[in-house]
Amino acid sequence: MSTRINKKYLTKTHQEESERNFRKTKKVDNLAGINLMEKLIFVKHSDLERLSEDSVFKSVCPKCKEGTLLVSREADGRIRKHDICVLCGQHFIYTDFKTIGRKN
């Protein structure tokens, strides 16, 4: 389902923003599930780029650079060994999963 916008009612700034968002959406659509069947990648969670300054666990996908690794946790607080990018589908194994997020 696509939404059509009547451009004659948009200001120049709104048109530019709309076009930027469209291009970004198109780029994301091209990445969706692209790495789903690729081999596992082993990474250190502590070396990954965080999604934001406030995010302790969520990381930017190192493969597609657009997706997110959400990071699940075990009952004892440790992160789970396996993760998957919500955009490109790349599977990751954290090599430092035993030490990250552990409760003292």
Image (tube, helix red, strand yellow):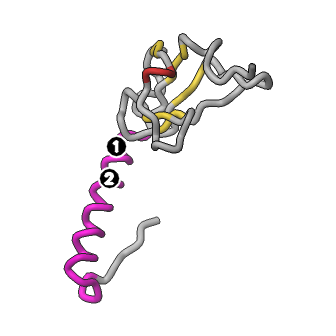
| Total marks in image | 2
Residue at position x 56%, y 33% from top?
Answer: 57
Image location of residue 31, percent across then percent down: 37, 39
Residue bearing mark 2: 26
Residue bearing mark 1: 30
The quarter of the displayed image where residue 8 is located: bottom left
The quarter of the displayed image where residue 4 is located: bottom left
Q: Is residue 10 magenta?
A: yes
Residue type at the position of mark 1: Asn
Image location of residue 12, percent across then percent down: 20, 79
Q: Which residues are magenta?
A: 7-33
Disc assigned to residue 8: none
The reply to whether discs 1 and 2 touch (Cβ–Cβ < 8 Å) is: yes
Q: Secondary structure at mark 1?
A: helix
The quarter of the displayed image where residue 65 is located: top left
Q: Nearer the viewer, residue 31 or 77?
A: 77
